[in-house]
Image: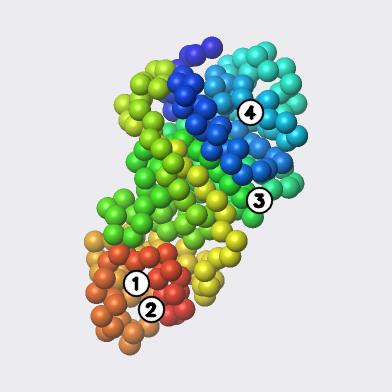
Amino acid sequence: MHTLKKSLGQHFLKDEKIVEKIIEALLQHPFKNLLEVGPGGGALTKHLIKIPNIHFKAVELDEEKVSYLQKQFPSLQNDLIHKSFLNMDRPFDEPFTVIGNFPYNISTQILFKILEWKEYVPEVIGMFQKEVAQRAAAKEGSKVYGVLSVLLQYYYHVEYLFSVGNECFTPQPKVQSGVIRLTARENYLPVKSERAFWVLVKTTFNQRRKTLRNGVKSLIPKELLDDEFFNRRAETLSVEEFAELTFKMI
């Protein structure tokens, strides 16, 4: 069963104490619907299927793992989706929580997919490559603060929960891991438009070595660019400042 498929970024969690910590974090907030992404060998699944009074589904791309999971957990027969998470349709019509030991090779894409469903996903508990987890939770001024940090934190409160050593997996990945929690914000910051916000954030970080004055000159009226504010660089702006800046966009 534990056949490694490098193309799918597979590493199987074997440390039961880490599994228990993830489950404990999940159970801190109530939910009715739960989607597990990439159950693999079922380290989390064997606990998740026992949670009472919820509707549980799992999505797994690897056909070998799908066959194994169906044999191991017969109750999953109609709730195991054999697809890529990135290409699947929304699994529930109602709000649902997402959990997973996410494939590291598509970590960032997974988070952007969750943003597509943000109105339906109030919470995410996920294990990612540590670098991605830190980037998601980073605050302004950090070297790893960037597009992912700002866009995620506009829609979610992001908490870095704990780190996980590579010895907790079979086979051991070459990187460390981190578990984060996303909790949907009740209210979003005012912006000119969400599209303007995304364009501004992506444009400034695409030229992060430049001052804002040079980075956003195509987006902000020329007469405003003399302000000292535009001497700053993208990584120094808070999510709130990015939101405020959208109102000065052309």
Identity, as a three-letter code, of the amino acid under mark 2? Ile
Callout 2 touching callout 4 (CB < 8 Å):
no
Which tag, 3 or 2, sits closer to the chain's start? 3
Image height check: is 146 above or below 169?
A: below
Residue with the mark numbered 4: 48
In this orientation, which residue lies closer to the viewer: 26 or 102?
26
| Residue tagged 2 | 220
Q: Quadrant of residue 207?
A: bottom left
- Residue identified by numbered label 3: 120
Q: Nearer the viewer, residue 209 or 125?
A: 125
Dot 3 amino acid type: Tyr
* Nearest to viewer (mark 1 / mark 4): 4
Give the CA distance from mark 1 to mark 3: 33 Å
What residue appears at the point 48 percent right and 14 percent down from the top-left corner? 3
Query: Percent position (x, y) of residue 184?
Result: 57, 54
| Measured Cα–Cα span from mark 3 to mark 2 | 33 Å
Is 156 placed left or right of 134 in the picture? right
Q: Say which label, 2 or 4, has the lower sequence index.
A: 4
Q: Which mark is residue 216?
A: 1
Between disc 3 and disc 4, the foreground one is 4
Distance between mark 1 and mark 2 Cα atoms:
6 Å
Sequence order check: which comes first, mark 1 or mark 4? 4
Mark 1 lies on a secondary structure that is loop
Determine crowd level at label 1: few under 14, some 14-19, many 20+ residues with C-alpha closer than 10 A.
many
